[in-house]
Amino acid sequence: MSELVNVCVDAMGGDNAPLEIVKGAIEAVNESPKVAVTFVGQESAINAELSKYEYDSSRVKVINAEEIIDPNEPPVLAIRKKKDSSIVVGLNLVKDGECDAFLSAGSSGAVLVGGQVIVGRIKGVERPPLAPLIPTLKGMSLLIDCGANVDARASHLYQFAKMGSIYMENIIGVKNPRVAIVNIGAEEEKGNALVKETYPLLKACPDINFVGSIEARDIPAGDADVIVCEAFTGNVILKMYEGVADALLKTVKKGLMSTLRSKIGGLLIKPALKKTLKGFSLEDYGGAPLLGLNGLVIKTHGSSKAIEVKNSVLQVITFKEQDINGKIRAKINEPA
């Protein structure tokens, strides 16, 4: 058997913990012989959930951590004070090399702060960005950054573009991925001060395929593979994506149920509609990696169900096999 990829899973993080978290991680173990899972959290609660499933027990481990960091707690203070929390214990397992990745649906702030403070940044990385995959008409794009760096500088966005290109090419398999910066127009002279300062840096970068600016309306069309922005803009885009998708789905369902004729038509198109809508489900794309750290840290939605947890665990396999951190180390210190 090839070397196992050991994923540390925060069993206590998120709205549906530990039920959906344990379920999803065990589904990943049962689906791939390459995966091992180390659960961290309250041992009794985790074992109660594990008792519901059949799995290879040699690839599943539980480490007790009694404390839980609440999403409303100040992240820096929580990381310092709650040393026996599932987040802190799990991040230390990655730092010490006992696990290849840490996955959590818990406090975003604590995961982001802990990732930088405990796991640490790759030398030369100024700021690690949070980078989720988002569905488009052409497949998927990487949105970088969506939550880690609200007040970013041009040099940060320059690095985001390089890290995002490495991720898309090696994890998703997009050759020479198109990189664009989020802007309010396609013209080079448009944008705020940050965009205007970053644009020429990206244009001159030999390591990326920079295609210019992209307006928000063109993101769902798949006009770029790597969408670069600071975290405030990225988070707004991501939340709008989720809200519009939910509203459209409810509107379609309401329309199909409005008359007897539409109900009959709905039954006929249901299989095709279900398949189409599945491609725009964010949960099928796994979690968002915090790129640029010495180890892999993945943040999933607080409302994550088993499917997102499973996909997040499985994505670690490719991340390790493709040595993404090694590739980032090799490229990140090249001059702008």
Image (tube, rainbow, N blue to C red):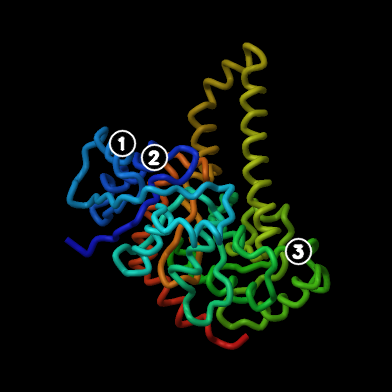
- Give the vertical position of 99 relative to 156 (above or below): above
Q: Which residue is mark 3?
A: 183
> What distance separates the C-alpha of mark 1 from that of mark 2?
7 Å
Q: Is residue 106 left or right of residue 102?
A: right
Q: Are marks 1 and 2 in contact (CB under 8 Å)?
A: yes
Q: Are marks 3 and 1 in contact (CB under 8 Å)?
A: no
Residue appearing at x 58%, y 72% in the figure: 127
User: Sequence-wise, which precedes: disc 3 or disc 1?
Assistant: 1
Quadrant for the N terminus in the image: bottom left
Circle 3 Cα neighbour tier, 10 Å, few/some/many (<14 / 14–19 / ≥20): many
Residue 18 badge: 2
Q: Quadrant of residue 44?
A: top left
User: Sequence-wise, which precedes: disc 3 or disc 2?
Assistant: 2
Q: Is residue 296 left or right of residue 249?
A: left
> What distance separates the C-alpha of mark 3 from that of mark 1?
46 Å
Residue 303 badge: none
Q: Position of residue 71 (x, y in %)?
A: 55, 48
- Give the vertical position of 307 relative to 184 (above or below): above
Q: Are marks 3 and 2 in contact (CB under 8 Å)?
A: no
Label 3: state its secondary structure. Answer: loop
Label 2: state its secondary structure. Answer: loop
Tag 3: amino acid: Asn
- Give the vertical position of 7 relative to 46 (above or below): below
